[in-house]
């Protein structure tokens, strides 16, 4: 297979580094010399300093985004390393992969004489190649003195091959390997591996001094993984990943633009929001059919065979996942989708197995999953990711979005629509979905530049204004009808589809909507491609070298891994019968409870009924009026021009009192913060504002005309205060009657990223903690790190996705979580000083409620720099250190 330009370049970088190893002798010295030749110095802010966790052994990383052909690069790297590194008695390679599924896939490719990977290796080693797995090694198949001297012995193993209980077999006495290990002793090649018999498989491999390839190396950064690498006695370690960690020594990287320029990936990813899940399902199916028609037309004109596939990402519901997926499939079949075109692929159900999805004989066009395709599965025919979950659900889009990126045949299609990835969602928080897609692209080695959000399309395909006028709102006299069901779906069989003469698809409102979607996406792809053509050249910058925040990843420390392996922190749960927005009823099986969200506590709250007692429109507290203008492409708030003020006021004064009130009511609603409108609804706020304006005195009415923003803030602030009180009352009431309960739910992520790592303190949960702390927070961190009773501590960063929080009438992120050596969990919040409208009392009340409900194994503390609240759980810093940390068990 012909290598792409960027693949040749990164391989040349690898050769240059290998030659420096031969000249300099150690990995660190070679790294410095390599970058010196590049005109860089490690530690200069762009290139990281070398991490020598294997001592003098060179360990370097090649960063290639998902879809960039990492395994092909690795296959081509083997002979380059053998030829350019110091000579060794044997040619041995250990190829490590993260999971069994990828292990099977890699073994299948490397053992298939016709696969691209095997063809490359056979060519480079004159067909003297033996591909071995762990069972082969334990049985000494093709592993003897003669074979290891003459051939390339290529072992394909999982990370766990030497780490879990079954992996201990590799450390035990093995009579089948005695001839080889005896030979290694007699020639001085033998290496003693701690804890292993001198005839064990790990000992035999160590004696062969292998080159080690670590695929998806971001999974192999724990202390155990590093120890495993040491035990293999490697002479060179080559890491391949899309997301290097802070401990990776990156010497070569490919960019997203390079992959796009080489037709390796379908970029950009265009994300569309639809009003309801039924719209998502309908448009996903219609989009697939249109894309297939486009693909058929392209094939008639000499193009490759492409059968676009939709990935339906269903919502996880308790432990009854399998039935959930089957119900979705049944609904699709009832709507007219042929059953043989649908397959389920989850952690428990695999209807794909060895299916060749790229075969023209394969009928599959729809795959239903949750997160099972996150790695180890790749089909370039996947074009559309459709998230089918409740609007309020937080389905992990980032775990699967990388699966729709690979470009079929690494060849650009003539039809632009076949060079793009599509994501459809009905999430209530479109920005959150965009953040998830960006996070998924970060995990795949891409960035937010590769995502184009489209949040201006309604279910009918027409443009939707982001803000509606007060007259439109006045027409909304009833709540939105919950018609989010699939029963209305109906599709003609695929074999009935045809492209009418002179048209691309049958006419109709649905087809017109999909046509507009494709036209919109094609324009985005054209612009993106032009940018790729201009910026496709490789540049050594902070993002390219992996210095960006998205790749500074830190894993849970091995020393404390067991303490959190099965730990689930308690969260508040709401009975499903009380859960809001239970759309798509009947499509999914549901458990009895769902995670409590604040919005559920406001279901019966009506902003229109709020008391107006606290809404004092005191002219002295009203800021001067401002106007919003654009100057030098920036949005600025400036003093209103006096002449403009005179003109607008004159027009206002000439109007009738009734029209004045309408004008002010409309202006106040438009000036109300978006978050308030989202929380309480435009209709409720419109009614409240109408009542307020109706009772305004003429002078106040005139003042409000000039000061929409401060008046609107006074109104929304009072609504917020009353809503908070309502949420507190509802939370207490629903807990007392058993509708809200505490249940174990939160699991610590295996790793996290930070741009400001703190590695100087001990007893951390992760290899580093976030260093962005104020003085009080740092003092508490020091206390935890130096307290003999503490097993581990973790700094909670609210802005970081996936962090723990106490979900009650507020979402409370305590600054620290810690575990004592006795197993108690501590949640600790710090407070510098009490401020006006401070939320300390709310946080303390919720924290105490959470800890008390969780039981004896949980504690909550609020630590003040001075003047603590006179309530249970509140302490001065010095008091907390002596009376709590010094005594807690």
Image (tube, rainbow, N blue to C red):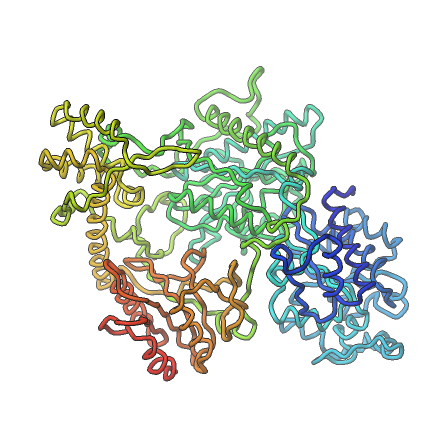
In this rendering, position of residue 752 left or right of residue 853: right
In this rendering, position of residue 786 left or right of residue 531: left
* Image label count: 0
> Residue 214 placed where, x, y %?
69, 60
Q: Foreground residue, 235 or 730?
A: 235
Q: Residue at x 22, y 41 (%)?
A: 712
> Residue 47 placed where, x, y %?
64, 56
Task: Using the rendered image of the protein, determine whether residue 333 is visible from the camera's viewpoint.
Answer: no
> Residue 508 placed where, x, y %?
45, 21
Looking at the image, residue 693 lies above or below residue 719: above
Looking at the image, residue 60 lies above or below residue 162: above
Residue 247: which quarter of the image?
A: bottom right
Looking at the image, residue 882 lies above or below residue 437: below
Looking at the image, residue 491 lies above or below residue 324: above
> Is the C terminus in the top left, top right, bottom left or bottom right quadrant?
bottom left
Task: Using the rendered image of the protein, determine whether residue 596 is visible from the camera's viewpoint.
Answer: yes
Q: Foreground residue, 343 or 297?
A: 297
Residue 40: which quarter of the image?
A: bottom right
Residue extending furthest toward the front: 642
> Is the N terminus in the top left, top right, bottom left or bottom right quadrant?
top right
Q: Foreground residue, 617 or 466?
A: 617
> Residue 370 placed where, x, y %?
50, 50
In this rendering, position of residue 392 left or right of residue 363: left
Q: Residue at x 22, y 30 (%)?
A: 474
Residue extending furthest toward the top: 502
């Amino acid at each position: 297979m012909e290598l792409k330009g960027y693949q040749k370049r990164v391989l040349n970088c690898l050769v240059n580094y290998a030659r420096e190893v031969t000249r300099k002798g150690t990995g660190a010295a070679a790294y410095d010399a390599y970058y010196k030749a590049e005109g860089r110095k490690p530690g200069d802010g762009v290139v990281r300093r070398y991490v020598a966790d294997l001592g003098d052994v060179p360990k370097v990383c090649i960063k290639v985004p998902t879809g960039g052909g990492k395994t092909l690069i690795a296959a081509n790297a083997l002979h380059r390393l053998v030829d350019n590194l110091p000579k060794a008695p044997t040619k041995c390679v250990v190829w490590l992969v993260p999971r069994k599924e990828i292990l099977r896939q890699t073994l299948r490719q490397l053992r298939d004489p016709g696969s691209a990977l095997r063809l490359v290796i056979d060519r480079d080693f004159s067909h003297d190649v033996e591909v071995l797995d762990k069972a082969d090694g334990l049985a000494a198949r093709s592993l003897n003195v003669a074979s290891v001297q003459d051939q390339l012995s290529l072992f394909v193993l999982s990370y766990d091959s030497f780490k879990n209980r079954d992996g201990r077999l590799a450390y035990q006495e093995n009579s089948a390997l005695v001839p080889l290990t005896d030979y290694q002793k007699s020639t001085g090649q033998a290496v003693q591996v701690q804890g292993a018999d001198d005839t064990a498989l790990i000992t035999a491999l160590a004696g062969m001094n292998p080159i080690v390839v670590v695929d998806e190396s971001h999974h192999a950064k724990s202390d155990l993984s590093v120890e495993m690498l040491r035990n293999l006695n490697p002479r060179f370690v080559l890491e391949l990943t899309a997301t290097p960690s802070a401990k990776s020594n990156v010497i070569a990287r490919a960019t997203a633009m390079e992959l796009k320029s080489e037709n390796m990936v379908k970029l950009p990813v265009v994300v569309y929001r639809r009003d309801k899940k039924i719209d998502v399902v309908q448009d996903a199916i219609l989009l697939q059919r249109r894309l297939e028609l486009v693909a058929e037309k392209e094939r008639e004109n000499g193009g490759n065979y492409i059968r676009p596939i939709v990935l339906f990402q269903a919502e996880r519901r308790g432990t009854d996942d399998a039935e959930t997926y089957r119900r979705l499939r049944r609904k699709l079949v009832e709507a007219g989708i042929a059953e043989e075109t649908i397959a389920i692929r989850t952690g428990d159900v695999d209807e794909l197995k060895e299916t060749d999805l790229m075969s023209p004989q394969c009928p599959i066009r729809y795959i239903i999953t949750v997160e099972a395709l996150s790695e180890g599965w790749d089909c370039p025919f996947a074009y559309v990711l459709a998230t089918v979950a409740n609007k309020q659900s937080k389905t992990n889009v980032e775990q699967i979005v990388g699966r729709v990126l690979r470009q079929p045949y690494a060849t650009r299609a003539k039809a632009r629509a076949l060079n793009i990835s599509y994501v459809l969602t009905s999430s209530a928080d479109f920005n959150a979905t965009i953040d998830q897609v960006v996070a998924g692209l970060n995990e795949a080695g891409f960035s937010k530049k590769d995502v184009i959000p489209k949040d201006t399309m309604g279910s009918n395909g027409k443009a939707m204004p982001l803000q509606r006028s007060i007259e439109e709102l006045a027409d909304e006299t009833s709540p939105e009808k919950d018609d989010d069901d699939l029963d209305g779906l109906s599709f003609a069989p695929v074999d009935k589809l045809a492209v009418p003469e002179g048209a691309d698809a049958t006419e109709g409102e649905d087809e017109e909507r999909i046509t507009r979607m494709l036209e919109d996406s094609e324009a985005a792809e054209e612009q993106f491609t032009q940018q790729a053509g201009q910026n496709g050249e490789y540049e050594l910058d902070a993002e390219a070298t992996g210095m960006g925040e998205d790749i500074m990843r830190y894993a849970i420390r091995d020393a404390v891994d067991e303490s959190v392996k099965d730990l689930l922190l308690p969260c508040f749960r709401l009975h499903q019968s009380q859960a809001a927005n239970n759309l798509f009823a009947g499509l999914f099986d549901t458990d009895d409870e769902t995670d409590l969200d604040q919005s559920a506590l406001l279901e019966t709250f009506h902003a229109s009924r709020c008391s107006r007692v606290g809404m004092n429109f005191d002219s002295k507290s009203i800021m001067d009026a401002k106007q919003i203008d654009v100057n030098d492409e920036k949005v600025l708030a400036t003093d209103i021009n006096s002449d403009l003020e005179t003109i607008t006021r004159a027009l206002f004064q000439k109007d009738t009192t009734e029209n004045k009130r309408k004008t002010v009511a409309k202006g106040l609603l438009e000036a109300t913060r978006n978050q308030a409108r989202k929380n309480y609804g435009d209709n409720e706020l419109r009614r409240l504002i109408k009542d307020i304006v109706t009772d305004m005195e003429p002078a106040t009415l005139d003042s409000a005309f000039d000061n929409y923003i401060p008046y609107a803030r006074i109104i929304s602030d009072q609504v917020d205060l009353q809503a908070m009180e309502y949420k507190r009352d509802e939370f207490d009431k629903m807990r007392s009657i058993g509708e809200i309960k505490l249940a174990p739910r939160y699991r610590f992520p295996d790793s996290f990223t930070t741009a400001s790592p703190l590695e100087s303190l001990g007893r951390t949960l992760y290899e580093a903690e976030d260093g962005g702390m104020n003085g009080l927070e740092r003092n508490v961190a020091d206390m935890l790190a130096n307290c003999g009773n503490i097993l581990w501590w973790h700094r909670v960063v609210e802005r970081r996705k996936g962090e723990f929080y106490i979900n009650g009438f507020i979402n409370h992120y305590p600054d620290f979580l810690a575990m004592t050596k006795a197993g108690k969990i501590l949640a600790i919040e710090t407070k510098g000083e009490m401020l006006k409208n401070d939320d300390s009392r709310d946080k303390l009340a919720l924290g105490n409620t959470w800890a008390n409900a969780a039981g004896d194994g949980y504690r909550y503390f609020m630590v003040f720099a001075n003047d603590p609240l006179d309530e249970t759980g509140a302490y001065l810093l010095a008091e907390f250190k002596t009376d709590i940390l010094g005594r807690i068990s």
